[in-house]
Image (cartoon, helix red, strand yellow):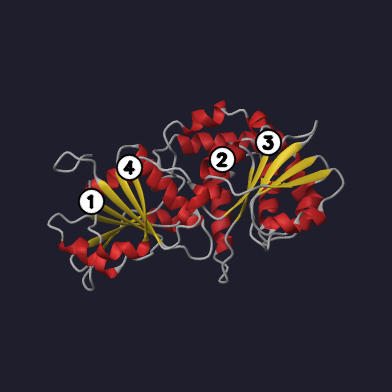
Amino acid sequence: MQTADSSPPTWDICCRVIDNYGDLGVCLRLARDLARRGTRARLWCDDLSPLAWMQPDPVERLEIRPWEQAEAAAPGDVVIETFGCEPPAAFVAAMAAKAVRPAWINLEYLSAEDYVERSHGLKSPQFSGPGAGLDKWFFYPGFNERTGGLIREPGLIDAVTAHHGDAWRAARGWGRLPGERVLSLFAYPQAPLAPLLEALGPGWLLLLCPGAPQAAVPPLLREGQRAIALPALTQDDYDRLLWSCDLNLVRGEDSFVRAQWAGQPMLWQIYFQDDGAHGPKLEAFLDAALAGAEDRWAANWRALSRAWNGLGPWTPACAEALRERPAAVAQARAWRAKLAAQVDLTSQLQAFAARAGGA
């Protein structure tokens, strides 16, 4: 949609980094996708340092600006407040003062829990504060047509299918030996690495993403296992890494979504929460992603997922799940096809913003 003067609309995407860079990763992917679809996107963030490796090259129509500069900025046509980060008060006041007020949308965290469908698309009128008179709308990503979907750039599945993973890895010195399987490992420091390596058995090359496992894994390797510590990768290269591995261990939200598009078996380490909310969140996702799978394999994979997240014991079923690759691949491809049949998040967000009053 074009603005009244026929110029591309401007979207502001506001992000605050809490303790990891997953929030910024999601925001960057959204901003970049919008820009590549013809929208002018401005990404405001209070910690831009990770972009030196996430996105070192400029993207046409994408501006990346420090958070404090938003205090004096003129808001665009759509303002995306990600994960309840609350834009600066002066920026919100400028939104309320515009003759044509922007659509104000809070992009929430991803979950498969039931509350997402109930909350997606709800409006919160602002009766006080700098945004008095504005409406804030809640937009929830999700895994079915009653939610806002997932970020999926045009042509993504075709790119995955055309990728030559072994050649791509070998060119970077990460090639497999004959008979080896390859996994990528991106994990939080509390990951139960020793039981995982025991369950894997021999014949694995572990590609370790930056983080605590790069130091923790090598002393724990079993016979017939190798590990390579990877440098920080751009988002595009991290995607290619996921496409080229036989198993992807991911964490948080951004890598979690990208691993699902890879169409390979994926083990998710959910962000730990002191109140235990991560347990039901994991179970809700497993209920969705394992629907229709063969009962025995699904039960084994559920046991493995619980154990990896410290929510269940390590049992022989965990090792069995890792050995049942044909079933795991079949389910990963079926799940990806189901997700790909839905409208992607950026397309849905653009349509939603138009209905909410933005461009």
Q: Earlier in the sequence, mark 3 or mark 1?
A: 1
Reading the image, the residue beneath label 1 is 77
Q: CA distance from mark 2 to mark 1?
A: 32 Å
Callout 1 amino acid: Asp
- Which comes sooner in the sequence, label 4 or label 2? 4
Query: What residue is at 57 percent from the left and 43 percent from the top?
Result: 238
Mark 1 Cα within 10 Å, few/some/many (few <14, many 20+)? Answer: many
- Residue 61: assigned label: 4
The answer to whether 174 appears left or right of 90 in the picture is right
State which tag comes first along the sequence, 4 or 3: 4
Is residue 341 visible in the rendered structure shown here? Answer: yes
Determine whether label 4 and label 2 are within 8 Å by CB.
no
Vertical comparison of 70 with 2: above or below = below
Name the front one of labels 1 and 4. 4
Q: How far is mark 4 from mark 2, CA to CA?
A: 22 Å
Q: Residue furthest top?
A: 162
- Give the answer, above or below, for where 307 lies relative to 61: below
Residue kind at label 2, given as amino acid type: Asp
Residue 44 is situated, as x and y percent measured from the top left of the image, at 36, 57
Q: Amino acid at mark 3?
A: Ala
Q: CA distance from mark 1 to mark 4?
A: 15 Å
Secondary structure beneath label 4: loop
Observer-side mark, 2 or 1, equals 2
For mark 2, what is the residue?
A: 237
Classify residue 83 as left or right of residue 197. left
Q: Earlier in the sequence, mark 3 or mark 2?
A: 2
Quarter occupied by residue 274:
bottom right
Which residue position is annotated with label 3? Answer: 327
